[in-house]
Every structure is written in C-alpha cells, then in structure tokens.
Image (spheres, helix red, strand yellow):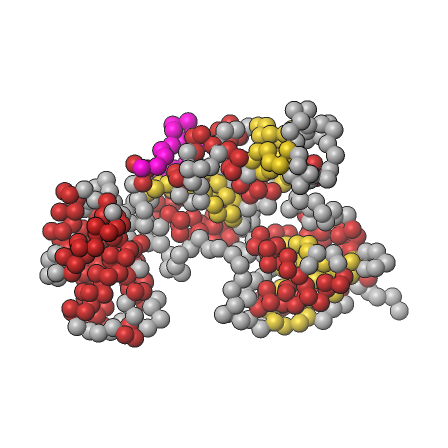
Amino acid sequence: MTDPHAGEAGELSAALDDVDLDSPSTTKFAEFEYVLATLIQLPRHQVYAVAVDRAAELASQVQSVPANHAVLLAVVVKDADQLAAVQEATKRYLSSGGVPAALVLVRRSAGGWASSWLAMQADKEEYAGQVTELAGHLSLRVERVEAQPARKWPGRSLRATDQPLVIDDRTRRMLRGAVASRSAVMLVGPPGTGKTQLVGEVIDDVAKEPERYGMTMAHDYLVVTPDESWSARELVGGETVDDNSKLRFSPGYVLEAIAEDRWLVLDEANRADLDRIFSALFTWLTGNTVIVGRVSGDPKSSPIFLGWADGPKSEVIGAELLRSDTADNGQGAVHYLAGKEWRMFGTYNAVDAQRVFRFGLALGRRFAHVPIEMPSTEGFSQALRNRLSALPTPLEDPVQTELISVLQRLYRAHVGLSGVEMGPAALLSIPEYLDAKDLATSPTELRQRIAEAYLMGMGTWLATLDDESLARMQETLRQADVLGDQWDWIETKLGGLR
C-alpha cells in the first residue's frame, strides 16, 4: 500500500537536500523552514532549523533560536552515528523550557533525509494539534517531554526582574514610536534607571504584539558591551589571520547580528568611542549601502557590502566567499542586508558620560534618543511594592511598613541631587537582601540590615560624591527615621571604596 504521507515527507527531504549545510549563512534554511511551516499551518517565523555534526554542538546552536516566538525547532543531524545522542540533547532542551516542540531529521545512507523523532513539552497543549498533524504527515509518534524547571539552558536575558519597569506612559509611547520608526534607538539616562531592562521589555512586547510596532514578527537579540579598547573591527569587522595564515575578513558584531537576523543591543554604549569606531555605519544608518571591507587581504578580492533588504528579515548573500576554503577571484561580492525590521539599541549612561565618551552630533543624529529619567516618588513607591509582593517569603507587616518608609526617604534624597543622579535599581534590590526567614523585627537590626544593603549597592556612588553633595545626603540619611547612626557606620566604609 502506498504511504499517503510519502509526498509530504519527500517534499521536506527535497527542501533539505537543497541546503548547503556547511554554509555560514543563517538564512540557508529559509525554504526548508517554509515547507515545514506550511505542513502544519504555522507562520513561517515560528519554525527554526539548526544543523549539528555532534550532540555537543546543540547547546551553542540553540542560543540563536528566537525563543520569543519559535514553536518548532528542527534539528538536522549530519552524522547518523550521532542520532541517538542528538535526540537526547534535544529532549533535554525541551525539558529545560526551550521551544514547545522539536523535530530531529537525519541523513539517510542511501541519500535524502528521514524524520526520525518528534516531541513536544507535555504542558504545551495549545500546540498539540499542529504537532499531531505533523506526526501524521511524517508517520511519527509524538513523545511528550516533562518540564524540569530547575534545568537552565545557556542564554542571557536582558530583564533583571520579572516585574515590569515603572515608567510614565509618555516615555513608553516615545520608545514605542522610536522603535517603530527608526533603525537605531538610544536610551539615555542615569545609572540604575532600568534602561537595559526596558530594552528587554520592548523586545518581549514586539514578540507579543508586533503589529503595535508596525512589524510582522518577533525578533531575537544579541547583547554586547563595548569598551574603550574597541575599534571598528569589533563593531563592523576587519581583517584577521585565518587557519591558513592568510588575511581574511572577519565580521564584527553588527554583521554577525544581521547574519543571524538578530537585533543588536550595545549595553553601556558610551564605554567605547562610538564616534571613532562607527566608521561606515555613519553612512549606512542613513539608509545607504556602504562597503565595509574585502574578502581577503588582496585589494582585488571581492568587496563586502552593508545595505538594507526590501523585506522584514535580514539576509546575507554570498556568505560562502568568507569561508577560508572558498576560492575568490574578485568577481563576486558579499552583501549583508539588514531587514526593514532590524534594530540597533544602545543604552547611554548620562552620568558616566563625564568620565567616558560622549556622542558627537553627527552620530547622535543617526539614533532616536529616548530619555529615561528618574521615576517620580510615586513611581518608585509602586516599583517597591511590586518587588515586595514578589518576595518568596513575605516580610511581616510592621517590618514592611518601616522598610517602605525608609526607602522612600532614601529615594527622595537621591532625586534631590541634580547632575549626579543614581537610579533606584540598588534601592529596589534591598528587600531581596532582607531574608524574611532570619530577620529580627527590632528597629535597630532592621536599620543595620538596610544600611548594609545600601552600602553594598550604593557605596561606590556615595564615595564619588563631592563634599557638598555628600553633606546634602547626610542631612537626610542621618535622621532617626531614615538610617540614624547607621549613616556614621556607612561613612567609615566609604574611604575604602574610593
């Protein structure tokens, strides 16, 4: 009897046959992902494919999975001897809370590809229909994988807390408009105001409702922290010596993010001299195409262009020329094309700008600048209540009431220091230092514990204040209903922090 689903399986195998698995391009699976998504009527961007030689490679590969929106991960196993190990690694990934479902495919000895294993997280019933349909198309059984919350898969989150940042509606509207209309967005404000967390919240918000930003899909991200040693090589790319001891172009973070279709986040951007290292990005950010280098050290080798794609997704054309084992006669070209929905974010510490680097006007025009100011006292109080409500072990009412009163007064003292402001992040972390299981309720010990947490979070900032600013802080903090004599203890420690 003819298998009624052989056609679908054959179509999937044929689409995978057309993929150059050794290509460095991260868009090489586009057609295969489209065919797989069509089989189960999922949006194209909810299917993501990776290829591995060995099971050990899976951990690094899945870090590029756009976890905000991917539903199905397709793992292509190039070495059939590794099939069992890769299936087990994929199972661990699902149990860690990765994508809801995964399909493993392996190369047949006679040619073509076979779908060998299909699984989904046991608690993701909302996707059971699509996964069951895929199982029917490929004649596979669906394995249910139980979640193991304690297991952590490699990766980095921009969000320091599960509690949304408390900022005013107008600032959120400005940020949403900037992301919707500009390719480069810079969040500017004092340290501790939640700029990095806010970038993470925007990325999450786009994943949930991309249409609010004029977009069509969610986007993964790459986070880097520049420093003063950076040159254009780190940000854009430049020549490096390859395995054959020859000069070869090595992409920088901007090109890497475009190749992986991930947004780029420059955290604490002004720790590098961006006016010096942006080089060709000045022109590129105005919507133009620029040349950023050549494939090799030969001045006649193929050029590498940075430009913009016509559609929402980023892509790389001619990436195979960057491989050290690919001959280049200078007749080709590599094109890095940022999608219309590609974004670059930066966070800019306005206080530390006195000691590191400032933006020049020319570069500043390339970014939409969104000021992230110190929250109002009401906003701080709301954020504090949110933190307290999220504590694993709640504080007793008298302790919580006293803590709120002290921290509110501390914050008002901070807000009063114009020009050297420090945001509320360190103050909002103080409740987590107070272990409710081992906290005496006496006012004296409570003040001691608050002073300890305050010194750990704010001591280096206090130590940099001039005498006038420190005296103004002292007027408030030495009061009996704030820190009282614990301020004297803090002062004795500041010398060691300077």
Residue 174's x, y, as percent? 38, 42
Q: Quadrant of the N terminus?
A: bottom right
The picture places residue 99, in percent across and down from the top left corner, at 58, 61
Is 1 displayed left or right of 450 in the figure?
A: right
State the count of labels.
0
Where are the magenta residues, as a range?
A: 355-371
Q: What's the residue at 69%, 49% (across, down)?
A: 29
Q: Kindly tell me whether residue 72 is visible in this rendering.
A: yes
Apparent side of residue 455 relative to residue 218 in the rendered image (left or right): left
Left or right, residue 114 beside residue 222: right
Residue 123 placement (x, y as % from top left): 56, 71
**Residue 69 visible:** no
The residue shown at (14%, 42%) is 468
Q: Is residue 382 left or right of residue 106?
A: left
Image position, residue 348 (x, y; %)? 37, 41
Residue lying at the far top of the rendered structure: 300
Between residues 292 and 115, which one lies in front from this camera angle? 292
Q: Residue at x 59, y 46 (%)?
A: 260
**Residue 496 painted magenta:** no
Residue at image position (25%, 73%) is 439
Name which quarter of the figure residue 87 lies in: bottom right
Q: Is residue 363 magenta?
A: yes
Q: Nearer the viewer, residue 60 or 1?
A: 60
Q: What is the quadrant of residue 426 in the picture?
A: bottom left
